[in-house]
Amino acid sequence: MITIEEARTYYQGADAVHDFDHVLRVLAMAERLAVEEGADPRIVRTAALLHDMARGHGDRLAADHAQAGAEMARELLDGQPPEWIEAVAEAIVAHRFRGGPAPETIEAKVLHDADKLDAIG
């Protein structure tokens, strides 16, 4: 599992809207929602820590930062159970408000909602 300190390294130079403070706020809200909704806390925690890591990574940042982030997460989490990796990646892909797939799993819905709640304040 990714630690907070490890995740922080992926957000060096991030813009003020998507900096690591944003990640920590999303993490706190996502963990709270995960308990309320019965989501897998390991999937939610990992996806929350990594959800915006593709922002600001130059050529790795495709038009869709969520898709690029999911691909980066798959690489970082290599060695974990494949179904767990895919659950994390699915949550990252579906966290986008516009233009992405609708979240389907409870973990993806939790991350999506936590990210949006932070965006609206």
Image (cartoon, helix red, strand yellow):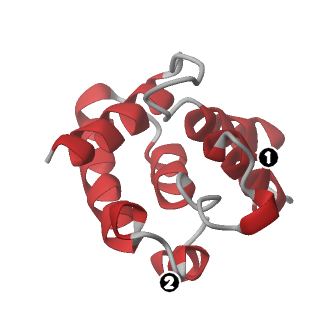
Residue type, numbered disc 1: Pro
Q: Nearer the viewer, residue 65 or 80?
A: 65
Residue 99 on image: x %, y %: 56, 23
Disc 1 crowd, CA 10 A, few/some/many (<14, 14-19, 20+): few
Residue type, numbered disc 2: Glu
SS class, disc 1: loop
Name the residue tied to disc 2.
5
Which residue is found at the position 61% from the left and 66% from the top?
56
In space, the residues marked 2 and 1 are separated at their CA atoms by 22 Å
SS class, disc 2: helix
Residue 13 on image: x %, y %: 52, 81
Residue 112 on image: x %, y %: 40, 33
Residue contact at pointers 2 and 1, CB within 8 angstroms? no
In the image: residue 111, left or right of residue 69: left
The residue at the far left in this view is 121
Which residue is found at the position 32% from the left and 53% from the top?
26
Which label is found at residue 81?
1
Residue 23 on image: x %, y %: 38, 62
Please tell me in which quadrant of the rendered image residue 70 appears: top right
